[in-house]
Image: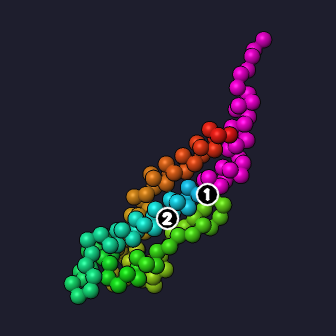
Amino acid sequence: MVKITGQKRHSKRLKAMSGQKMIQNVGRAIFAGSDEVRVEAQHLISQGSVQGRNHVPSRPGEPPNWDTGVLAGGITNRKTGAVSAETESSAPYSLPLEIGSAKMAERPFMRPAAKNKRRRIELLVGSAVNIVIRRG
């Protein structure tokens, strides 16, 4: 005869993995991660910048330098679903800066911000999952 131990505990953990607490915890972690991307993008824009008369445009391939504050101020994040969120920039010139145009080389700020925060977001989500599984 074979004796199986831990069946109740395992069943409880599996149930927790698909429950409302899991969705709430992971959703909060994803939103927190999108906020970290927002802050990182704003940081990349402001890093080493000079405003006003002494403003110097960034070089191609580097994040744009802060000038009027519209670009950095227009970066927001919002929850888009139970376990989804997005970070976006509403400045009218965001896309040409990010991907370039016929007249200007790209000066990405959102993609580098997301790349810089990818591992941190993975850790946030992993931690949220582990908390729910451990507490069951």
Q: Earlier in the sequence, mark 2 or mark 1?
A: 1
Query: Is 45 above or below relative to 14?
Result: below
Q: Position of residue 72 (x, y in %)?
A: 40, 76
Q: Which residue is mark 1?
A: 27
- Indicate the secondary structure of the residue bearing disc 2: helix
Magenta part of the chain = 1-27
Q: Amino acid at mark 1?
A: Gly
Q: Is residue 80 found inside the magenta-colored segment of the image?
A: no
Q: Is residue 3 left or right of residue 117?
A: right
Left or right: 61 as drawn, with respect to 36: left
Residue with the most extreme top position = 1
For the point 39% across and 58% down, the residue is 116
- Residue 96 appears anywhere in the view: no
Picture quarter with the N terminus: top right
Pointer 1 local density, CA inside 10 Å: few below 14, some 14–19, many at least 20:
many
Disc 2 crowd rating (10 Å Cα; few below 14, some 14-19, many 20+) is: some
Q: Residue at x 71, y 31 (%)?
A: 9
Q: Can you name the residue that lies furthest to the right here?
A: 1
Residue identified by numbered label 2: 35
Which quadrant of the structure image shows residue 110?
bottom left
Image location of residue 107, percent across then percent down: 34, 73
Residue 63 percent coordinates (x, y):
33, 71
Q: Residue 27 sits in which quadrant? A: bottom right
Q: In front here: 65 or 128?
A: 128
- In-front residue for pair 126/105: 126
